[in-house]
Image (cartoon, coloured by chain):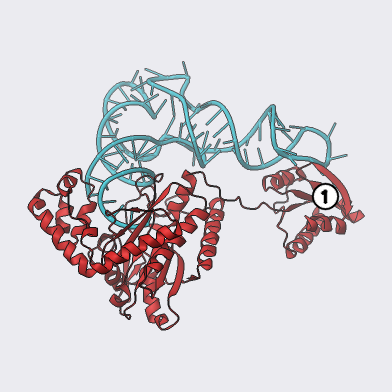
RNA sequence: GUGGGUAUCGUCAAGUGGCCUAAGACCCUGGGUUGUGGCUCCAGUAUACGUGAGUUCGAAUCUCACUACCCACCCCA
């Protein structure tokens, strides 16, 4: 047995796939109610798309992408969902259509990382994107949709954190101020923090190194450096969330690791998820479409980790309905009966009944046992004896009662439930 | 890349140097009067001590290495 599943991936077994289907259905319904339509893009794209979109200095692009060369092209498995949608949105000129344009997606994503609880190399995301609105009403709707969806699947113990990371203008100001603040102690920070000083000083604030944190106390906050526009926008977002009755906390610590974000950044975090506590992260990206070669076009969206959502559901004991059992099992004794059973099963199925039959040629006892484990509420037993009489035994598995009926009548009973 | 933990049948799990050619439970299969499940009883099945060295008269039990998995840092969904 050397052939095992690659590290960082997981099989979704039949025993759990129903939960996935249920969540997907829930997500689709929520999106539909907000007018978002499904977008399906390829699982791989030109590597350059991600380099330009996500940012070539980000960890994701620098060391986590599944990149391969084929026919002299460099391709990469999507590490997140937004870039592909943006690419296609531009390529198909959907920006020329009705705006705002609203999409959702359900997709696997790939990042070469060390495995951990809530973190895999192949993982799955629900996500939405809204293009063409620079109003905070859009940000509020995106957040509301996520909030709505999370609530609808019964999870609790999650909190919404919001922040504004400003536009390129105020970010530049802030960046300078931050560098000035850090510079005196730069040599005392940890290596990674030092390496980020020039490329992405804002991420230094994220450092978990306790020593680093000592030197970061009293560091300037982005919220103090927002330009008039961004400041106003952030206030508007909060007003909109207040109006919707969605609770949130302003958390200046949120710095999205993907470069394309501007202004709004938000996260839904859970306190029962362990280290990987972010179940949903998103924000505004006002220049991404342009960056990838499209027109000036603001956007806002989020990505939501399905595996993490499932962990969260499990952690707080939220119920996902059980997969429906089969309606009826047809047990057959003897060759003639077996053939008849198959025919009857086909008839019932064509009427939408979920029917199981024996496919092993096992004894009656074993067939009933199998029926029981399959959760069948009714069992139709036919043998050559019954066949001769044109009858069948209809057994109610719940009440252990049984009666002999003409076959047609038995079928009718089953159809009636 | 850096730490820590774990590794016994399909699954869970006893066992801490000789009674272990490894308990038990679950699962699975068959049976308890010729054709009736869930409970119960009986039986059956299995080349289970991660791999490789070492210590020892003797190792699942001790040592080392390796591997795999898990958890944490980092980063993120």
Examine the rendering and report whether any part of residue A261 can be seen.
no
Rendered colour, chain B: cyan
A394 horizontally vs A55: left or right = right
Rendered-image quadrant of the C terminus of chain A: bottom right
Q: Give the residue drawn at x 36%, y 63%.
A: A237
Identify the hue of chain A: red
> Residue shown at 38%/47% (left/top)?
A117
Q: Circle 1 marks a residue in which chain? A: A
Q: Nearer the viewer, residue B12 or A19?
A: A19
| Numbered label tally | 1
The answer to whether residue A240 is left or right of residue A340 is left
Q: Quadrant of residue A64?
A: bottom left
Residue at point 41%, 64% (across, down): A140
**Is residue A306 visible in the rendered structure shown here?**
yes
- In the rendered view, would you say A182 is above or below A91? above
* Place of residue A377 in the rendered image (x, y in percent of width and height, measured from the top left): 74, 48
**What residue did someone put label 1 on?**
A394
In the image, residue A390 sits, relative to residue B71, either above or below, namely below
Can you give x and y, in whole percent of width and height, for residue A121 in the image? 37, 56
Residue lying at 28% horizontally and 75% vertically, measured from the top left = A291
């Amino acid at each position: 047995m050397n052939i095992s599943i690659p590290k960082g991936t997981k099989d979704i077994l039949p025993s759990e796939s129903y939960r996935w289907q249920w969540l997907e259905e829930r997500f689709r319904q929520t999106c539909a109610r907000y007018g978002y339509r499904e977008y399906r893009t390829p699982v791989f794209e030109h590597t350059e798309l991600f380099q330009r979109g996500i940012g070539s200095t980000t960890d994701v692009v620098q060391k986590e992408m599944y990149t391969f060369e084929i026919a002299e092209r460099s391709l990469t498995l999507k590490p997140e969902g937004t870039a592909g949608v943006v690419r296609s949105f531009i390529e198909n000129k959907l920006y020329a259509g009705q705006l705002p344009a609203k999409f959702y997606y359900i997709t696997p994503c790939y990042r070469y990382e060390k495995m951990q609880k809530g973190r895999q190399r192949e993982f799955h995301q629900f996500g939405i994107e809204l293009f063409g609105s620079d109003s905070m009403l859009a940000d509020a709707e995106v957040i509301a949709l996520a909030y709505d969806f999370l609530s609808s699947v019964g999870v609790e113990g999650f909190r919404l954190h919001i922040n504004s990371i400003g536009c390129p203008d105020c970010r530049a100001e802030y960046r300078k101020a931050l560098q000035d603040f850090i510079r005196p102690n730069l040599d005392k920070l940890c290596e990674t923090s030092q390496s980020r000083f020039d490329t992405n000083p804002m991420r230094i604030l994220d450092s978990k190194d306790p020593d680093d944190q000592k030197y970061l106390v009293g560091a300037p906050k982005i919220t103090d450096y927002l330009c008039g526009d961004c400041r106003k926008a952030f206030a508007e977002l909060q007003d909109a969330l207040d109006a919707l009755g969605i609770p949130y906390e302003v958390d200046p610590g949120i710095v999205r690791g993907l470069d394309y974000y501007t202004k709004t950044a938000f996260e839904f975090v859970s306190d029962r998820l362990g280290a990987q506590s972010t179940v949903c992260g998103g924000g505004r990206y006002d220049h991404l479409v342009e960056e990838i070669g499209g027109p000036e076009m603001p956007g806002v969206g989020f990505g939501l980790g399905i595996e993490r959502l499932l962990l969260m559901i499990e952690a707080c004991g939220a119920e996902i309905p059980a997969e429906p059992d089969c309606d009826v099992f047809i047990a057959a004794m003897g060759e003639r009966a077996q053939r008849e059973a198959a025919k009857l099963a086909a008839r019932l199925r064509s009427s939408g009944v979920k029917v199981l039959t024996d496919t092993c040629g096992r004894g009656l006892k074993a067939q009933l046992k199998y029926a029981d484990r399959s959760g069948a509420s009714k069992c139709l037993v036919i043998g050559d004896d019954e066949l001769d009489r044109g009858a069948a035994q209809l057994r109610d598995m719940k009440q252990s009662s049984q009666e002999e009926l003409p076959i047609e009548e038995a079928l009718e009973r089953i159809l009636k439930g």
